[in-house]
Image (cartoon, grey):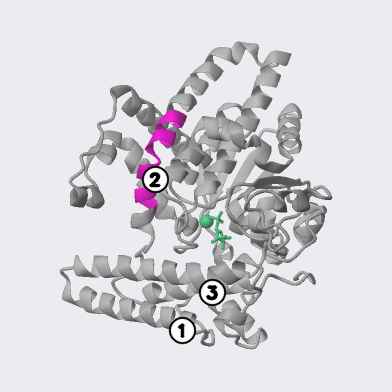
Amino acid sequence: LDTKTPQYMNNDEKSFAYVSARDRWPVIVTGAIDDTYRSVSQCDDPAKLTEGKAIVAELARLKYELQHDRQMTPLRDDGEGDIAGYNAELEKLGTPTWFQAPWLFSECYLYRRISTSFSLSTHWKQYDIFSRQKMATFRSSRPAVLELAARYRELIGQMEKDKAKKGTPEHAEAEKILFHEMCEICLWGNATDLSLLTSLTYEDIQKLQGSEARKASEKNILVNDLEAAYGVLKKARDEGKAERRIDIVLDNAGFELYVDLILAGFLLSSGLATHVVLHPKSIPWFVSDVVPQDFSDLLSALAQPKKFYETQSEDEQLQDKTPEPLADKEAEDLAFLFQEWGHLYAEGQFVIRPNRFWTHGGSFWRLPAEKELVEDLKTSELVIFKGDLNYRKLTADAAWDPTTPFTEAIGPMGPGSGVNVLALRTCKADVVVGLKPGEDERIRATEGGGGDSGIRKWAWSGKWAVVSYSGGK
Ligand code: F6P
Ligand code: MG
């Protein structure tokens, strides 16, 4: 099932699709080539080296085809069930050239195509071209990571002390405020995905991540349905339901995954949920998205925080820079997180559940056809979709009038679907729904908003956000 509303296309000069396909994707593929090349040159095994060189050549060919607007070729079969779907879709679209294709499908195809070069190899099957970049950016968000670790530890201690007050009106009010704060941290953690790094400096990122920045940004949340989402969780608890699960369809690794775990930990400690199921991607995706390996990378960093922050990175070696040492208190705060999360994982309260559907080329209008997955999501109290791409997929990346209700724009995932949906999204693409009449026009008129160019430029940068809820039951 697909929407009848036209989708954004790469040939639409007024859409971010146009800029993405022409300017951003070649930069991303070049980054992938450089990264692979670097690993190839560090490789001692001759068979692996030869194969690595062939992969580099393949990626260079892909870049050429993209930049010269060649036809998108069918994907080679790497044995996974989604290849047939990709190729059938390509045929249905008339095997378009890159710049004539729908934005959503062609962008997914790009990452799926890159992944076949590795999955079809012998020595590079598990290789993640974005792993270096993901870890480096996480390390550079150190100030915000430390600030949050201290805050989280304090909070968990406080909640432990206040246990006796449970059920009092003050306690209920405090819990609600905290829920809002935690969700907003988790929301803005999405402002910094690496696919936009082509335009953001590390300094910009740090500015986006601190608590001051968060307060200042509240006025930039254009739709905020957190109240409704909180109500659902509270009701389930008040009714005495024994198992109350929350799902998070993850977006980016590094700082964003870190704040997702902060939110998840809070939901469990506060008793707003008893289980949290996390849904990562199965292949390297949209540069920074979480793959299962990113969990272990994050946890190893937290397990040995001094080693992680105090060992010189490759770049620091080149620039002869010594990283600043970590204070004991800072290291203890991070170790506390490691223990907390390790414990929750061991107890089965955190569950990681990958599914190939998340890397299909279609929108979530097709989710109800994935019987097993949708049945699973129905048993959750709340399914949180993180980030821009998940929002584009929920709304089918279609050119909706911005006042269209969210519940309508997500089609079969809306009321009646059996799934309670909460989208936490900073806007990095054209599609946006659920706005009050006149709001789009008002923001277009602000500086950098697009003016009367006919371009919704304000929605591209991650400065604005929407938090939208749809009750499916
Ligand atoms: O807008 C740029 C972009 O690459 C989109 O193509 C994509 O939807 C998004 O960024 C990825 O962002 P996120 O990590 O929030 O899904
Ligand atoms: Mg992402």
Is 138 magenta? The answer is yes
Quick one: SS at disc 3?
helix
The reply, left or right, for residue 204 in relation to residue 231 is left
CB contact under 8 Å: marks 3 and 2: no
Task: Please tell me which residue is depicted at 66% across the width and 16% down the height of the picture.
Answer: 166
Which portion, as a residue range, is magenta? 134-148
Q: Position of residue 336 (x, y in %)?
A: 39, 28
The x and y percentages for residue 436 are 81, 47
From the image, tell me which residue sits under label 2: 138
Residue 361 in view here: no
Q: Is residue 312 visible?
A: yes
Is residue 250 magenta-colored? no
Query: Quick one: label 2, few (<14), some, or many (20+) residues within 10 Å?
Result: some
User: Which marked residue is nearer to the observer: mark 2 or mark 1?
Assistant: 1
Q: Which residue is mark 1?
A: 65
Give the residue displayed 32% in from the left and 76% down from the top: 56
User: Looking at the picture, which amino acid does disc 1 mark?
Assistant: Glu
Q: Quadrant of residue 410?
A: bottom right
Q: Nearer the viewer, residue 156 or 180?
A: 180
- Point out the tag, 1 or 3, that comes first from the N-terminus: 1
Q: What residue is shown with label 3? A: 109
- Mark 3–mark 2 Cα distance, whole angstroms, equals 27 Å
Give the mark, 3 or 2, whose residue is nearer the N terminus: 3
Q: Amino acid at mark 2?
A: Phe
Q: Is 128 left, or right, of 424 in this rendering?
A: left
User: In this rendering, which labeled residue sits more in front, label 1 or label 3?
Assistant: 1
Q: Earlier in the sequence, mark 2 or mark 1?
A: 1
